[in-house]
Image (cartoon, rainbow, N blue to C red):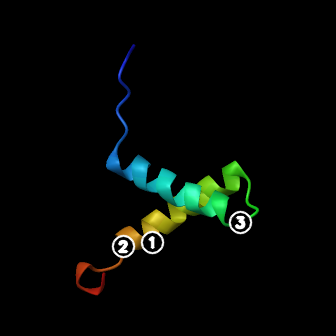
Amino acid sequence: MTDVFVSRYQKRVQFVQDVLLRNSKLGDKDAHRLAVEVVHAIDHIPEERR
């Protein structure tokens, strides 16, 4: 059994994707694409505003 490294970024994208899949009619690909954009947007909010 080999361990696969999963970055914190990948875990965050997967979390957002799971939320989108549970709460919308988006397909897997579209949910992933949107999750990447959401995480990217959150990452670019200035620290003092978060």
Mark 2, residue position: 44
Asked whether 40 or 3 is in front, the reply is 3
How far is mark 1 from mark 3, CA to CA?
20 Å
Count the numbered circles shown: 3
Place residue 26 in its image quadrant. bottom right
Q: Position of residue 43 (x, y in %)?
A: 36, 68
- The residue tagged 1 is 41
Tell me what residue is drawn at x 45 percent, y 72 percent: 41
Question: Which label sits in the foreground, 2 or 3?
Answer: 3
Q: Residues within 10 Å of mark 3 (few under 14, many from 20)?
A: few
Q: For the residues marked 1 and 2, what is the alpha-carbon distance in whole angstroms?
A: 5 Å
* Helix, strand or loop under label 3: loop
Residue drawn at 68 percent across, 50 percent down:
29
Quarter of the image holding residue 23?
A: bottom right
Q: Residue 35 in the image: state x and y as whole percent.
A: 55, 60
| Tag 3 residue | 24
Callout 1–callout 3 Cβ contact below 8 Å: no
Quadrant containing the C terminus is bottom left
For the N terminus, which image quadrant?
top left
Residue name at image x 50 percent, y 68 percent: 38
Q: Residue at x 65, y 60 (%)?
A: 22
> Where does residue 6 sit, x and y in percent of width and height?
37, 38
- Position of residue 25 measured from the top left corner of the image (x, y, whole percent): 76, 62
Residue type, label 1 = Ala
Q: Which mark is residue 5?
A: none
